[in-house]
Amino acid sequence: MPYPIVALVGYTNAGKSTLFNRMTQASVLSADMLFATLDPTLRSIDLPHGIRVILSDTVGFISDLPTMLVAAFRATLEEVIEADVILHVRDMSHEDTQAQSQDVAKILGELGIEANDRRLIEVWNKVDRLDADGRAQLTNQAERQPSDNRPVPVSAITGEGLDHLTAAIEARLGEGRLTMDLTLDIADGAGMSWLYRHAEVLSKEMTEDGKMAVTVRADPKNADMVRRKFLPPVPVEY
Ligand SMILES: Nc1nc2c(ncn2[C@@H]2O[C@H](COP(=O)(O)OP(=O)(O)OP(=O)(O)O)[C@@H](O)[C@H]2O)c(=O)[nH]1
Ligand SMILES: [Mg+2]
């Protein structure tokens, strides 16, 4: 897949599809026509800082799913395993929100996605249905979590909180990516174009001794290649 995948998962009726529609509303990419035709649950969107991702809606979880449907349900969820970010959408206005969340966590666990998986972001949806007290309580609860693992209160209906959500997605996508400072020979045009193909070139500057200082960011897989190609091997100590 050329773009990172952001999958929406959650209990049935949590608001996944509403959120999906809300987040893709502004996107009018022509490529989407193809996507929408091939698979209405996939759509590409551009995040505020320019990263293009594919948003993937999924079927909702239900506690007492008929056995004959379990296999089909599992099959549709397999895609989630490969997602780069997993949004666990919760209906925070539902009286059973806690139990629903546990059901979802259990199924994710069976797919190998544990609660502490860095790809997971909890989306606390339907905050518009809460009164002032309920909201304040949620906000407090969210803010007690470490900032890099904080649930994001939103309303897919009013659009409230969606800016925080896209920021959280961007932050998670950025996490796995490593920034490296490299020095290239000024004549190494091939090296430079290789870098443009395999990494994001953040800056490029001539040094006093006539070399090229380049700062790049790459995902872990490519970062390793960059390191091997451009950085001196780490000396082994005996
Ligand atoms: N008030 C309010 N209602 C919402 C919000 N998000 C979704 N809903 C409503 O909740 C209901 C379910 O929304 P969907 O988006 O279909 O939920 P879903 O998670 O896709 O459900 P499944 O696909 O069946 O799993 C709809 O009636 C939505 O209008 C929200 O933020 N606030
Ligand atoms: Mg849906």
Image (tube, rainbow, N blue to C red):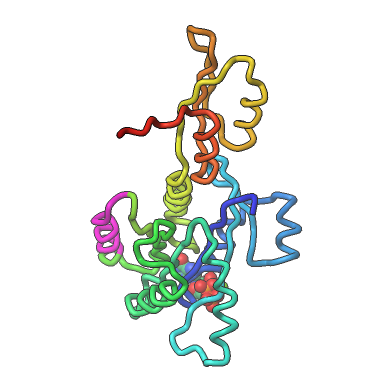
- The image quadrant that residue 123 belongs to is bottom left
Q: Is residue 188 left or right of residue 133?
A: right
Residue at horizontal 47%, vertical 42%? Answer: 177
Considering depth in this image, is 53 or 137 the residue closer to the camera? 53
Q: Is residue 180 left or right of residue 192?
A: left
Q: Position of residue 105 (x, y in %)?
A: 39, 73
- The image quadrant that residue 22 belongs to is bottom right
Classify the position of the N terminus by image quarter: bottom right
Residue at horizontal 63%, vertical 20%? Answer: 188
Whether residue 188 is situated above or below residue 115 in the rendered picture = above
Q: Position of residue 72 (x, y in %)?
A: 60, 82
Q: Residue furthest front?
A: 238
Residue at horizontal 52%, vertical 92%? Answer: 66
Whether residue 53 is situated above or below residue 16 in the rendered picture = above
Q: Position of residue 191 (x, y in %)?
A: 62, 26
Q: Position of residue 174 (x, y in %)?
A: 46, 44
Q: Which residues are magenta?
A: 135-147
Classify the position of the C terminus by image quarter: top left
Q: Is residue 108 left or right of residue 212?
A: left
The answer to if 221 sits in the magenta stretch is no
